[in-house]
Image: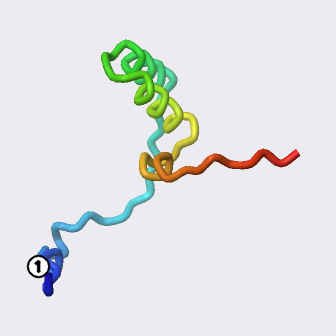
Amino acid sequence: MTVNPAVMVATRYIGKARKRSRVLTPNEIRLYLRTIYQSNIRRQFKLALHIILLTLSRKSELLLAQRGILCT
């Protein structure tokens, strides 16, 4: 391609960056985990979704993570 089609999107349709201050309540976390583990998805996805919650990482960050070496 020689032209970027995203250039044609008007700036009024592009979201503004805002601070996020909302956090999940303990009940929402409980519901999230219960829903994950009661679902029919594969175990590896259940564990990945749990790790994402625990580490507050993005899915892409988790996918690109490499095994770290533990320093003692």
In front of the other: 48 or 36:
48
- Residue marked by disc 1: 8
Colour scheme of the picture: rainbow
**Direction right: furthest residue:** 72
**Direction top: furthest residue:** 38
Under mark 1, the amino acid is Met
Identify the residue shown where x is 49% and y is 53%: 64
Q: Quadrant of the image for the N terminus?
A: bottom left
Residue 46, above or below 53: above
Q: In which quarter of the image is residue 54?
A: top right
* Coordinates of residue 46 in the picture (x, y in percent): 43, 25
Q: How many labels does the image show?
A: 1
* Coordinates of residue 49 in the picture (x, y in percent): 44, 32
Residue 51, above or below 12: above
Observer able to see residue 44: yes
* Coordinates of residue 57 in the picture (x, y in percent): 51, 46
Identify the residue shown where x is 31% and y is 16%: 40
Q: Quadrant of residue 6?
A: bottom left
Residue 43, above or below 62: above
Observer able to see residue 28: no
**Direction bottom: furthest residue:** 2
- Tell me if mark 1 has few (under 14), some (14-19) or many (20+) residues whose alpha carbon lies within 10 angstroms of its own: few
Identify the residue shown where x is 47% and y is 19%: 30
Q: Quadrant of the image for the C terminus?
A: top right
Left or right, residue 16 beside residue 1: right
In front of the other: 59 or 69:
69
Helix, strand or loop under label 1 = helix
